[in-house]
Image (tube, grey):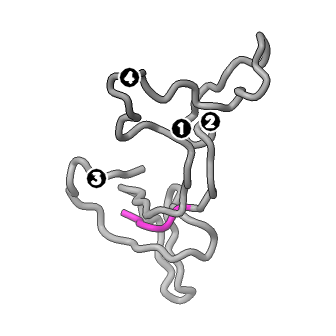
Amino acid sequence: DITGVSKGKGFAGVVKRYHFAGGPKTHGQSDRHRAPGSIGATTSPGRVLKGKRMAGHMGNSRVTARHLEVIEADPARNLLLIKGAVPGARNGLLLIRKSGGGASGSPSL
């Protein structure tokens, strides 16, 4: 398992963050092309439910890529060759651990 901090994307809208389809380009739409649409019902429940997917900060969070394979280790050059993508930007710090049977509900890539 390799754990790192994912690349930050800043403040992202729902189209980029959650892959919402967006609104129609024509038929009277003037400024709703990338808007989320309705965010709830009416008088009942009279609030926005918890967990509603909305625009906000994306990335820059701790991510674990699991079951990656170490191809080769070069102690002379202080290198590890890993098969697959690892989280984070270039020159970022990574925590490398042996893959184990972690909790079933833990987030992973």
- Which is more toward the observer, 25 or 86? 25
- Residue type for callout 2: Val
Q: Earlier in the sequence, mark 2 or mark 3?
A: 2
Q: Secondary structure at mark 4?
A: loop
Circle 2 residue: 15
Left or right, 54 with reference to 15: left
Circle 1 residue: 18
| Residue 15 drawn in magenta | no
> From what the image shows, is residue 94 above or below residue 60?
below
Circle 4 residue: 43
Residues at marks 1 and 4, CA–CA distance in whole angstroms: 27 Å
- Residue type for callout 3: Ser
> From what the image shows, is residue 27 above or below residue 61?
above
> From what the image shows, is residue 32 above or below residue 61?
above
Left or right, 15 with reference to 38: right
| Residue 4 drawn in magenta | yes
- Which is more toward the observer, 31 or 16? 31
What count of labels does the image hold? 4
Residues at marks 4 and 3, CA–CA distance in whole angstroms: 36 Å
Q: Quadrant of the N terminus?
A: bottom left
- Residue type for callout 1: Tyr
Instruction: Tell me where residue 27 appears, x and y as whole percent.
Output: 77, 10
Instruction: Tell me where residue 29 appears, x and y as whole percent.
Output: 75, 19
Disc assigned to residue 106: 3
Q: Main secondary structure of the magenta part?
A: strand
Q: Earlier in the sequence, mark 1 or mark 3?
A: 1
Residues at marks 2 and 3, CA–CA distance in whole angstroms: 25 Å
Residues at marks 1 and 3, CA–CA distance in whole angstroms: 20 Å
Mark 1 or mark 3, which is nearer to you?
1
* Label 1 packing within 10 angstroms: few (<14), some (14-19), many (20+): some
Residues at marks 1 and 2, CA–CA distance in whole angstroms: 6 Å
